[in-house]
Amino acid sequence: MGVREQQPNLRRKLTLLVTGLGLTIVLTVGFMVAVVQIQSAITAYTFGESVWSRAQVDAVRHFHRFGETGRFRELAQARQSLMVPIGDLHARLAMTAPELDWARARKGLEQGGIHPDDFTRMILLVRYLSWLEPMETAINAWQATDDLLMEMDQIGNAMEREWLSESPDRSHLQDLEQRLSTLDDQLRSRALVFRLAMGEAARWAAGFLSWVSAGFLALVTLLSWFLAVQLVKLLQRSEQSFRSIFEQSAIGIVQIDPAGRIVNANQATCDILGYSREELVPHSYRALIHPEDWEIEKEARVAINRGDIDNYTTEHRLVRKSGELLWARLTISRVWDAASHSFYFTTVLEDISESHRLSTELSYLATHDSLTDLINRRAFEQQLASHLGRVRNGGEQHALCFIDLDQFKVANDTSGHDAGDQLLRQVASIIQKNLRDTDILARLGGDEFGLILQHCDLDIAHRLAEKVRASLDHLVFTWRGTSHTISCSIGVVPITAETTGISALMRAADIACYTAKDGGRNRVCLMALDDEQLATQRGEMEWLSRIQTAFQEDRFFLEGQVIAPSRHSNRGLRYEVLIRLRAPDGTVVPPNAFLPPAERFGVAGRIDRWVITHVLEALSRAPQHLERLDACHINLSGRSFDQSGFADFVVSQFTRYQIPPHKICFEITETAAVHNLLEAEAFMKRLGDMGCQFALDDFGSGLSSFGYLRQLPVTCLKIDGMFVRDILTNDTDLAMVRAIHDIGHTMHMTTVAEYVESEQAAALLTDIGVDLLQGYWVHRPCPLKDILNMDDI
């Protein structure tokens, strides 16, 4: 049998041995981990029993105090303590049900005071090892407490009824307390049985682990000895097979003498470079290196020749026999030959031409937008910083433009992302054709483009920007039979030496672009850095720091406005929560002063999070109010949907404060929903699946298609107050209200009229059939805490 046939057999044998050892170790570790997890779960149950017992004792103590004193604070504390063992009860029912309910089991264990890290192991222990005798005994003892806990809760309810009556019956209260003591003794007895059974389970697990560990340790020792013997045999053959490995290696291996001549090379080296072995062996190694790359790693070559280092790795170009170039990675090692008392160099050669090409492409992709092949924001900001530096060093004049497409989102959402991508490519091509060779165009993200106009003053920049705008003016983009008209808004600012930095420069261009959009779109807005309008916009941006300060100083507060049924009904309480800001001097800042800047400059999402957290926290502290609550309306900004973690945050707050999701109705304005259609739809789908309600606010103001309603899980339609305010005198407004109400009812939605400010308007809206009314005639906004304490509306 030849060497080539022996090598695969040896490798297979070694692989099987190592694999067998590895599997044995994995199984050993698996068994140990499993038993340790069992022990940890048993320990967690033992700890949980102590928490359970303490809570049960606390509940009994507070029930006794309530029975004696009638203080409802004691009753509340008793019920809170009782929730711990009841949570464990629900967890056990979820774990032992025919189909395991993970969510309910985790929620019950959390209520029972168990650490979240122990949830999984505790659930699996009961689910799959309940057949063990100690576990079966423990679970039976645990199950025997169910009726006792329920009876204890009923005793608490009976005590509450007595103390709520005009003349509590003391003898009945004493009987209840006596029964409570009996239940306490019975629960303590069951807890002791549970604790003893868990101790027995822990001892069983410890013994099992010892035997399993010993057995697997013996097996691993035997396999290790066998593997060592085989490895020794393998090493004895390695010297004989070295030459075969050298020849058969797919990586080039070259031996070079101290003078730089090639003294040996394997077949892979010959294949890579295109030479025969006879041509390579007397060849000079330096002659293979591209002349421009010889200086690469020169210091490392000198160091390895002197013996200062043993090896180094470098990458450079080599020249094939055909004259073609290839990129190679070379690892050069210094080897001492004891027989000749001299050294030589072994070079491992890898052809990395393809990976180098991919690296070059990745470098390009890191600085360019893959969709339009324009430079991206990162590269654009580097270019902008470079131009700003040259301006400061003297003489040059440039301008910065922000280009934002008008109506792009409508085309993208209605025709799909493929259409949007094609439109962006077409727009980039049109803009580039209308620029000079020296101008720099970039895609900053979404439908925003940045443009550096080199060597021009503001007048020239304005003309060039107008040329770009005109090239896109009324661009008709057609996709699969659907046509969209696209235009752009452009903000232009000069790049001057007075600019504090590229962030300030880009912010100024962004403000100029926003001003162009705010002025009607499809226009160019030119602003100098000292422009009065720019200063006004900057004034709005100062609200960012004011809002930040308000958060730090806790000057936000909440009010509520009741939403009442138009006719008598059995509906519960419904109201809208309103955010308010108190100025440092104590005055209340109008919402229209701070909310638009917050929306515009990206702080609205933080305000939404603050409102959600504080509303849910307040509701969690008012269980009686929550019981009769039909819906609490919370407004959401469209900017919140741009935040990838917003839905996760909202879900976490529901979990944290244990508020039933169906009690909350999120209000989203029509324009925010349309402009963030995909994001809003995903958010509403996720929260809607939990039970949350959704209202489309200010409906009719955006003049959007009713077709959007089919895509959104909306249950409530709020008619924009601009139509309601003059409904008594304006026939057009009346027709709009009727139309919106009719379409809402057709789609099985509840309709709400805002800005109801008179009895006559309320009567007319009632005749139309509008379900709910909101406005100053119904209720003036008041502090949220007053609504939480309302006995009636």
Image (cartoon, helix red, strand yellow):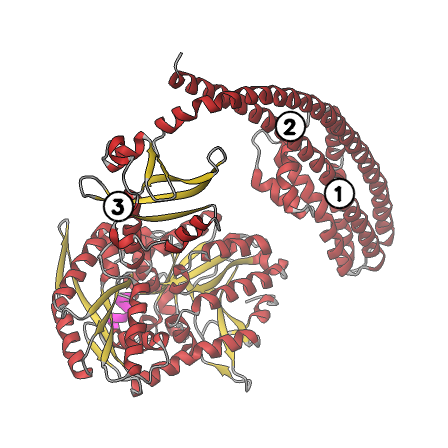
Q: Is residue 171 magenta?
A: no
Near-viewer residue (207 or 323): 323
For mark 2, does the 10 Å Cα neighbourhood hold few (<14), some (14 to 19), or many (20 or more) residues? some
Q: Give the residue type that dot 3 points to.
A: Ala
Q: Quadrant of residue 255?
A: top left
Q: Which residue is mark 1?
A: 47
Q: Seen in the image, is 148 located left or right of residue 487? A: right
Secondary structure at badge 2 equals: helix
Residue that mark 3 sits on: 287
Q: Position of residue 727 (x, y in %)?
A: 31, 72
Query: Which of marks 3 and 2 precedes in the sequence?
Result: 2
Write down the residue under mark 2. 31
Q: Residue at x 75, y 58 (%)?
A: 164
| Mark 2: amino acid | Phe
The CA distance from mark 2 to mark 1 is 24 Å
Which quadrant would the C terminus be assigned to in this image?
Answer: bottom right
Tell me if residue 448 comes above or below residue 456 in the rendering.
Answer: above
| Dot 2 or dot 1, earlier in sequence | 2
Start-end of magenta stretch: 731-736
**How far across and how far down the image is residue 170, in percent?**
86, 54
**Front: mark 2 or 1:** 2
- Using the rendered image of the protein, determine whether residue 556 is visible from the camera's viewpoint: yes
Could you say which quadrant of the image residue 214 lies in?
A: top right
Which amino acid does the dot numbered 1 rest on? Answer: Phe
